[in-house]
Image: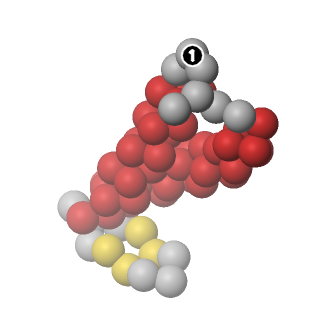
Amino acid sequence: MGVIDKIFAVPAFLMGVLLLILGAIGLFVGCKAHFTLPPVLGVVPAIVGWGILRSVYLAWKRPGGA
């Protein structure tokens, strides 16, 4: 990853952390943030957050650029 990619990856990673926390809480009590999900579907933000975190982590660790 180049410098520009890393600059944009940091906010994406932070957003992923936020979504992961929101989804973990949402699993049990639901969530509401400009959208409302019932308790069971409240885990959806966690799934999206995990996808963001995993993508950024793998891209950051990959040697060289692609």
Residue 35 in view here? yes
Residue 28 in view here? no
On the rendered image, what quadrant is the N terminus found in? Answer: top right
Q: Which residue is mark 1?
A: 63
Query: Which residue lies most toward the front here?
Result: 66
Query: Which residue lies most toward the bottom here?
Result: 34
Number of numbered discs overlaid on the protein picture: 1
Looking at the rendered structure, the kind of residue marked 1 is Pro
Relative to residue 34, is residue 64 drawn left or right? right
Q: Position of residue 55 (x, y in %)?
A: 45, 38
Q: Is residue 19 above or below residue 53?
A: below
Q: Is residue 36 above or below residue 47?
A: below
Q: Name the one closer to the observer, 58 or 32.
A: 58
* Among the 4 quarters of the image, the one containing residue 17: top right
Relative to residue 60, is residue 54 drawn left or right? left
State the SS at label 1.
Answer: loop
Query: Which residue lies most toward the top here?
Result: 63
Relative to residue 2, is residue 55 drawn left or right? left
Residue pictured at 50% horizontal, 55% vertical: 19
Q: Position of residue 22 (x, y in %)?
A: 48, 56
Q: Name the one closer to the observer, 32 or 6.
A: 6
* Among the 4 quarters of the image, the one containing residue 43: bottom left
Q: Name the one closer to the observer, 54 or 42.
A: 54
